């Protein structure tokens, strides 16, 4: 049984574990806007959970940061890819306009 003085740590640890589990589930999402907003909100929730033992907190934080990092890296790669596509499309449109003007 957990002593009464340890219960807040236990509740905070459980909540942080839930946050990490959700972040890991969201890491593969392609709903860029909603997922980014949710991950940012989860950072606020993390801070509001209360104290957790340092070792467990560090472990959970590393997992949370890794999940967020995976998502935001993929988001950045997608944004870069789409910018490249838009640039190519613009070149094609300009070429079509130039041919139409001839």
Image (cartoon, rainbow, N blue to C red):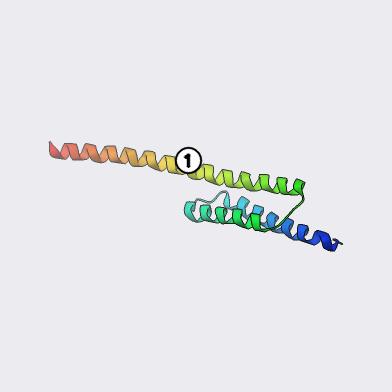
Relative to residue 55, is residue 6 depicted above or below? below
Using the rendered view, name the quadrant where residue 19 is placed: bottom right
The residue at which mark 1 appears reads as 77
Seen at 17% across and 37% down, the residue is 99
Seen at 25% across and 41% down, the residue is 93
Q: Is residue 86 left or right of residue 20?
A: left
Element at label 1: helix
State the image coordinates of residue 84 (x, y, percent, origin top left): 38, 38
State the image coordinates of residue 57 (x, y, percent, origin top left): 72, 49
Q: Quarter holding the C terminus?
A: top left
Q: Is residue 54 left or right of residue 66?
A: right
Relative to residue 71, is residue 48 depicted above or below? below
Q: Quarter holding the N terminus?
A: bottom right
| The residue positioned farthest toward the bottom in the image shown | 4
State the image coordinates of residue 88 (x, y, percent, origin top left): 32, 38
Relative to residue 88, is residue 10 depicted above or below? below
State the image coordinates of residue 56 (x, y, percent, origin top left): 75, 48
> Residue 17 or 48: which is nearer the viewer?
48
């Amino acid at each position: 049984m957990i002593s009464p003085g340890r219960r807040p740590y236990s509740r905070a640890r459980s909540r942080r574990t839930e946050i990490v589990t959700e972040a890991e589930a969201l890491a593969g999402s392609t709903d860029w806007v909603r997922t980014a907003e949710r991950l940012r909100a989860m950072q606020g929730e993390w801070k509001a959970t209360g104290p957790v033992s340092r070792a467990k907190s560090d472990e959970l934080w590393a997992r949370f940061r890794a999940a967020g990092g995976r998502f935001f890296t993929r988001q950045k790669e997608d944004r870069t890819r789409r910018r490249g596509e838009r640039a190519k499309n613009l070149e094609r449109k300009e070429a079509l306009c130039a041919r139409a003007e001839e």
